[in-house]
Amino acid sequence: MEAIEMAVNKLAEDFKPAVVDFCQRLIRIPALSGDEKGVADLYLTEMEKLGYDRCFRDRWGNVIGIIEGTEPGPAIMYNAHLDHVDTGDYSEWNGYDPYGAAIDFAEMENQDRDGFERVEVIHGRAAADVKAGGACQIYSGKILLELRKIGYPLKGRYIFTGVVLEEPAEQLGMIKLLEDTFPAEKISYDGVVSCEATSLKLYLGHRGRVELKVTISGLTSHGSAPWLGINAVNKATKFIDKVEEYMGAARKRDEQLGNSSVALTIINCTPGAMCIVPDRCQITYDRRFVPGETYDGCVAEIQTIIDELAAEDPDFKASVEIAAVPRTTYTGLTVTVPNVKEAWKISPEHPFTKAAAAGLRAIGQPVKYGYWDFGTDLSVICGREKKPAVGYSPMQEFYCHRPIDKVRIDYMIKALAGNVAIFRELTELEKKDFALS
């Protein structure tokens, strides 16, 4: 192991108390989607304290921190999101305060999910999604600053971004960061490392997602005379069965990402009152799709089912659209964007992935690959922007969004060093190495 790699590992150990403390402070601040100001403030204060060359908040509420290298090279964005999901019922937390950030020893899954290890952990909402990862990315930047101070050459530019409103899934924070803030601030980037949960593996993709809103129309009547109306809920039952039948036969599969799927997540009717046959039934579907499928294609599938049922039953009337809900940032801006994510994956043989793997090997970490079950903002990076990206972080997907939310501290220290090692290798790449086919 070269001297600089040894220095990186040592600095990661040296910063253990500081990164653990920062992670705890992040967890103690609630940051539901649209209410991330407290956490954003804390990120900015920490970057200023650590000596980032520049840090600021954009008008959408995203936070950005920049560390300049000593030599020209690529700009690599290290990305986290600021928001988290609701805690749910406190009684499910086994006595832990979701915002307490308690530290103790607990049984945790190992990296390969085939056994458990008793290790020191931090408990709390967003420990696994993604406050521990964000804390590590901030302090990996501090390691880079220390290396620069010592005199080690540092290529390129390290960019930390913490974006708002990731959890609602429309990717509003990331979209506005790239479409608005970066052009206005003349910031460019060549590739991205996300801190969504990966168990210290390199994650290389996930399925796409579209939220489909179906409205089935009927006709109201008095509940005592249902034959005078058209019950939209009764019509919906045929539709629901048809969707399940269709997806069972038409489901696509990707070797790495798994099966496409559809899940009915919300159903309600109107007027929804006593003695009135409902004239509207609204159904929301969570449709996951693999490369080769598109969200427009998912809409067309549902329309085909509607058309088939309408041909069989003249009283069946329905429409389908992509859900779009107005979202308001904590800075007061309101935007409506469609709830879609592109499917994406990057090859283990892509130069970007190979460089990230080389970085981990250089500091003695094993290289393993994985793919997310859930979706991330990397759909914007790889699906729309056509920039390369990987995931790497200390958190484990199994613990996300659950009342057993926690993170391994030993993995956090490894991630501190791993982020730095990955950055150093990525900034050795040439421009052509960042192209996505």
Image (cartoon, rainbow, N blue to C red):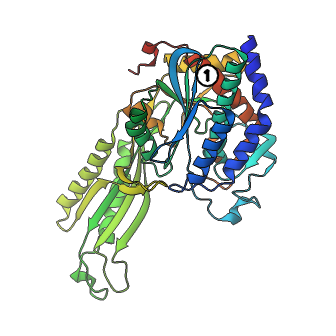
Image quadrant holding the N terminus, namely top right
Left or right: 67, with 149 as reference point:
left
* x, y percent for residue 399: 65, 47
* x, y percent for residue 231: 29, 74
Quarter of the figure with residue 412: top right
Q: Residue at x 82, y 41 (%)?
A: 118
Left or right: 244, with 107 as reference point:
left
* x, y percent for residue 54: 56, 33
Crowd around label 1: few <14 · some 14–19 · many ≥20 (10 Å): many
Image quadrant holding the C terminus, namely top left
Left or right: 150, with 263 as reference point:
right
Quarter of the figure with residue 283: bottom left
Q: Residue at x 24, y 75 (%)?
A: 230
The relative height of residue 9 versus residue 30 in the rendered view (above or below) is above
Residue found at the far bottom of this picture: 224
Asked if one can make out residue 93 in the rendered structure from this viewpoint, the answer is yes
Question: Which amino acid type is shown beneath numbered disc 1?
Answer: Ile
The relative height of residue 72 versus residue 128 in the rendered view (above or below) is above
Q: Which residue is drawn at 71% across and 49% down?
A: 25
Which residue in the structure is indicated by mark 1? 422
